[in-house]
Image (cartoon, rainbow, N blue to C red):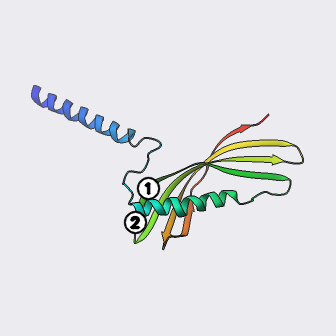
């Protein structure tokens, strides 16, 4: 009986350490679990990253409000092929600065978002942005 309890405790300890190890890995800024081939890494660097930068540079200002967006970080955290389509899952963080010309107020935010890109023949054929999260602070 003493040996059975010892074995059960050992199995529970091993399971707990495995769960802890799986939950603590991967590190925050190295989210990609499967190594990319050089071709897929090139597609991310040469097509997806410039596409994101171009989208954030687009003028979305409205009337007296000037809106400027700037990419802070962009990270590929998953690549997979599902039903023959290449899916790149990307996490972006970008700064947003809102300037109201009438009230002369400014507001700055850092926003984060996950986006899934579907690629075909080295082109973005579709993308699916998820909800953004915002950390707000006001400039005085």
In this view, 15 is above or below 125: above
Q: CA distance from mark 2 to mark 1?
A: 10 Å
Residue 49 on image: x %, y %: 56, 58
Q: Is residue 1 visible?
A: no
Q: Which residue is mark 2?
A: 81
User: Looking at the image, which residue is at 65% across and 61% down?
Assistant: 54
Q: Nearer the viewer, residue 78 or 121?
A: 121
In this view, 1 is above or below 80: above
Quadrant location, the N terminus: top left
Marks 2/1 in contact by CB < 8 Å: the verdict is no
Residue 42 on image: x %, y %: 47, 61
Q: Element under label 1?
A: strand
Of the numbered discs in the image, which one, if any, rests on residue 100? none
Q: Quadrant of residue 30?
A: top left
Q: Which residue is mark 1?
A: 78
Q: Nearer the viewer, residue 130 or 72?
A: 72
In the visual, does 131 lie left or right of 16? right
Residue 40 on image: x %, y %: 43, 62
In the visual, does 8 lie left or right of 31? left
Residue 13 on image: x %, y %: 25, 32
Q: Quadrant of residue 85?
A: bottom left
Q: Element under label 2?
A: strand
Q: Nearer the viewer, residue 120 or 5?
A: 120
Quadrant location, the C terminus: top right
């Amino acid at each position: 009986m003493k040996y059975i309890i010892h074995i059960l405790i050992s199995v529970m300890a091993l399971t707990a350490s495995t769960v802890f190890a799986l939950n603590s890995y991967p590190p925050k800024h190295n989210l990609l679990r499967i190594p990319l081939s050089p071709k897929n890494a090139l597609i991310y660097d040469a097509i997806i990253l410039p596409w994101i930068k171009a989208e954030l540079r687009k003028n979305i200002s409205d009337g007296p409000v000037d809106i400027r967006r700037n990419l802070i970080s962009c990270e590929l955290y998953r690549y997979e092929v599902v039903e023959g389509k290449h899916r790149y899952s990307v996490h972006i963080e970008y700064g947003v600065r809102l300037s109201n010309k009438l009230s002369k107020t400014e507001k700055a935010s850092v926003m984060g978002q996950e986006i899934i890109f579907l690629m075909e023949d080295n082109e973005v054929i579709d993308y699916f942005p998820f909800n953004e999260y915002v950390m707000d602070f006001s400039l005085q």
